[in-house]
Image: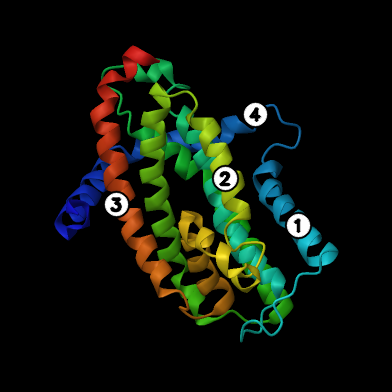
Amino acid sequence: MALLDPRILYRATAQTMGMLGRHRKLLLEMVRRDIADRYVGHMLGLFWAVGHPLIIMAVFLFLFGAVFKARTAGAFETPFGYAVYLLSGLVPFISIQEPLMRSPLAITSNIGLVRQVVFPLEVLPVKMVLASQLHLLVSLAALVLYSLIAYQFLPWTYLLLPVLVLLLLVLMTGLSFLLAAVGVFFKDTKEFVQIFIFVGLYTSPILFLPQWVPNALKPILYLNPLSYLVWCFQDVCYFGAILHPLAWVVLVTGSLIMLVVGGRVFNRLKVYFGDFV
């Protein structure tokens, strides 16, 4: 219960932000190099940074919108169709997929930096989170462009997107700290993350409407932490209203708690990293 104390959450958040502020030049340079190095030698280069999320979105739209002909007509009072519903859920999924996959290797893939006594190790997980958010920007741009072309308007809730993106970054930073620290000692961490991502995609309300789920299986939606993130994005990008206030409470408190927990675990274990990498 101590983690719910606003004073603890504030101090931990301020401490993390202060650390990142002190090393902002190093962090930004590492993010730039991470993005550039990822596509060095690729014939299409940075095209993949844009093409990867767009291809994923196009495939799901084709499969569920054209082949299975899923529809939201009559289910909600909103002018948007199933395509916007699907894209609203895919945006957060695409944005968390890569940092979750890379975070367990944040320390073990940088052995040379880990063994430098003066290097701020906290920068490594955060760098992976920030470098991966290029996909978030691309997928959000695709969603906004599609909505404007197809419906010629955006609801007022799109003004909340910066808040939602900030909460997402806080959540992913905390998770990245935790996974990076645990990944040093448990090499299977990446495999567990892969399973979580796969299961999370098909057990959260991204591809289907909650109404389609039998009552006996609906608890699965609420046990899946990804569902709350998806509901918040759907409120902003699809419903145009805050229809899931509980999801917002869970996302705000969960993001701050994860930042505290992830930061504490990372700080307590980082002195042992050099012995295990």
Query: In the image, which is nearer the foreground, mark 2 or mark 1?
Result: 2
Circles 4 and 1, Cβ within 8 Å, touching? The answer is no
Q: In what element is the residue under mark 4?
A: loop
Query: In the image, which is nearer the foreground, mark 2 or mark 4?
Result: 2
Find disc 1 in the rendering and name its residue.
58
Amino acid, disc 4: Val
Query: Sequence order check: which comes first, mark 2 or mark 4?
Result: 4
How packed is label 3: few (under 14 Cα within 10 Å), some, or many (20 or more)? many
Taking the view exactly as shown, the residue that stands out farthest to the top is 275
Q: Residue visible at 69% across and 77% down? A: 72
In this rendered view, identify the residue nearer to me: 84 or 225.
225
Query: In the image, which is nearer the foreground, mark 3 or mark 1?
Result: 3
Find disc 4 in the rendering and name its residue.
40
Above or below, 125 relative to 49: above
Q: How far apart are the alpha carbons under marks 3 and 2?
A: 21 Å
Q: How far apart are the alpha carbons under marks 3 and 4?
A: 37 Å
Q: How far apart are the alpha carbons under marks 4 and 1?
A: 26 Å
Q: Position of residue 114 (x, y in %)?
A: 36, 19
How packed is label 1: few (under 14 Cα within 10 Å), some, or many (20 or more)? few
Q: Position of residue 170 (x, y in %)?
A: 37, 52
Q: In what element is the residue under mark 1?
A: helix
The figure's colour scheme reads: rainbow
- Looking at the image, can residue 27 be seen? no
Q: Residue visible at 61% across and 87% down? A: 77
Circles 3 and 2, Cβ within 8 Å, touching? The answer is no
Find disc 3 in the rendering and name its residue.
257
